[in-house]
Image: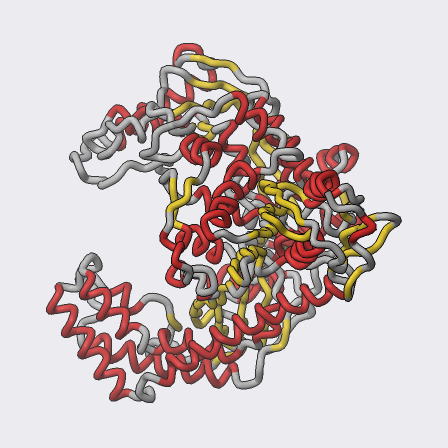
Amino acid sequence: MVAAATLGMLSAGIGPQKESDAKMTLTLQAMSVANALTRLSTAAQLPLVASTQTANEVICLRFKDVPLCEALKRIAEAVDGTWRVEGSGYRLIRTSDQLRAEKTHEYQLDVERFRGEIQRAADGLDKYPAWSSAEAESLAASAESISKGTKGSLTDPKFMSQAYAIAQQTPMGRFEKQFASLLDPQELADLPLFYQVVWSSSPTAMQRPLSHDALDRIRQAIQAQKEWNEAADRHGLTDRSNAARGFWMEGGFDSSAGRQHPVGKVLLIGTRTGLGGNATFELVGYDASGSTLGQSSSSLSDTSVDATAFTNKKADSSPEADSVVSLGPDAVALVESFPRQNRGDGTLTQDLIARLTNPELNDPLSLTLSPALTKIAEIKGANMVACLPDSAMSAATMGNGHEVRIRQLLDRLAYFQVDSELKNGWLVIKPKRPDEARTYRADRAELGKLLRRLKTGGPLTLDEDAYFALNLPDRRINIMPQWLGHLLQRTQVNGSNYDLLRFYGCLTQAQKRSMANGGLELSSLTPGAQEFLARIVYGSDSRLRFTAPPSQAGNPDVVSQRNLFMRGFLRQATEALPNGIPPQGIAQLEAGSAFVVRSDKEDGSGPRGAMNPRDLAWQRFIQDRPDLFPGMDQPSQRLNLSALELASEARYTFTFTFSPTISLVSTLNGRATDESQRVTMDGLPDEFRKQYVAAYEEFKRSYANAKPGQFGTSRSTPPP
């Protein structure tokens, strides 16, 4: 044991000075820093505690004959913390300077990633000959030649490779690279997640200014596209009999001879689609009247986390890199029990379920990843400190086997933005972006509430789903809660209208009543609800609609506005609501419910989502006709329709009225209660069964003359 007196004072704010040769040996699987320091404090007979800034970090340790002062120094470095003297012991803190330094570093990482992508686009453009009508003719002739040689088959790998190379040199292929130079990497690094940020040649209050040369670039692109269209016509590339027609002519601006309107306005719409340097862009040009001339889409993606860069250069050079480690019995059981097509359905033991549903004491990373990491350290003969983000769990659960090579596991960690390095006898593993890792880490107490609730059976109600959507990280970024929840209950959580679900979760009962009885003014919403409403309106899936009173339907101004909304710039939310969401707007709520059914697949691999009468009729029809829908005779595709789960589904329709002409309507569906009953087809409610029978007879009539194999594959949803 190491007494407190032997440790002395702090050294440079990093860790205790070494004043003793006393050493310790200790292995801890993944757990919170607070729990780990409690264990370490007992072993060292020294008070060690975590601050609120560091208590919830998840660490995994392997010490063998390590001086305590060295162990504490390594822990502080792994969590980007500092030890502070407190009474007779020490507290692990993180200073405001350290927090600022982390945020600044991660911001600069994003800036450099975007700058690199922009430069790569520019470098790719420099490889092509300058554009001219002669170049258009040459490219079209080459495209015609390869189309004839391969019959333009989109399933021919040789054709696709050659066609892609040519398509990259067409005006739109070039322009996707060219307009990257319009972007500022620092602005891109500032983009909020899942919003549409709009740059404009004549910006509204909700837009950002676009550089002055954007209009010239667009005009040049339209002229070049006109030359390409003419050359493509001469060489038969636009002929509808050409299988690759869409490949050559996909996207681009309408620059036909009959429409040579000058560009009046340009919008560049950017959406940050994930952490790191990942973003998509759409460039739209409008004429002087505001009608759309055309558009082009592109993306910038962080190649450092691309599947083709699935490697960790620092961690794979040791002689033991190809040694095999077991993932551990818990990890194997969890992976095998996860419902996945073409995989046996394992069974979780009651002991494992008990530990799984108590993540406060049994961290999910201790059940999945950390046993393999401690084994790696043992094989390498190294001490280890690992600070693990939630994303690291995927490194252990993404494979199918019971074992994995050391190199492979560390490469998987690198893919999920987790660095690992073996140096001077220490294996150090930590998130590349620690501030983001903390921001999107699942609170273990809230995760425990979710898992224990799912263990009781019955899918989440809509209210419960909204609660967990608010109190657990964005499920588009952190999949841990959904992955673990799916192990305990195969029913699906509300997967659509995610921001609307969180908006709903912010509402009080009084606000819901007001919305249902005339409406609620938007200014009375909480800041949280207003934030989610902004995401709904200005997000990547914005669905504004144009409405007008019947008395104004023939008004020329209203007709003009409607046309601009349907085919012009008013379709963009930052144009339709140029000054933001009006506080005097009204939110209304219409609540309803209806019966739905669910059923498990015949192979037991998982359930089908909620089915209304028409959905159920379609599922029955395609299972009755595997001759028309190949694959429907396989248990992995068929539902067990002899055993149905009947439940009441709530349906909440929100109408947001922002102005006399601009509104948004969106709907949430989910379980009204957690109660359900098992029924057969004969036990369906009368009205439900009546609609089911009518829909089934409709499908029989519609497909009466269909021929076997005509539809290729089965369809999960019924035709409209």
- At x 80%, y 51%, the residue is 90
Answer whether residue 623 is visible to the viewer in this image.
yes
Q: Is residue 71 above or below residue 354?
A: below
In front here: 168 or 391?
A: 391
Does 711 sit left or right of 718 as displayed? left
In front here: 19 or 285?
A: 19
Answer whether residue 593 is visible to the viewer in this image.
no
Q: Is residue 635 above or below residue 561?
A: above
In front here: 414 or 681?
A: 414
Q: Is residue 369 above or below residue 77?
A: above
Residue 388 x, y percent position in the rendering: 58, 49
Does 43 sit left or right of 566 as displayed? right
- At x 51%, y 66%, the residue is 568
Q: Is residue 233 above or below residue 632?
A: below
Q: Residue furthest left?
A: 149
Residue 29 x, y percent position in the rendering: 58, 40
- At x 62%, y 61%, the residue is 192
Q: Residue 501 falls in which quadrant of the image?
A: top right
Does 13 sit left or right of 702 as displayed? right
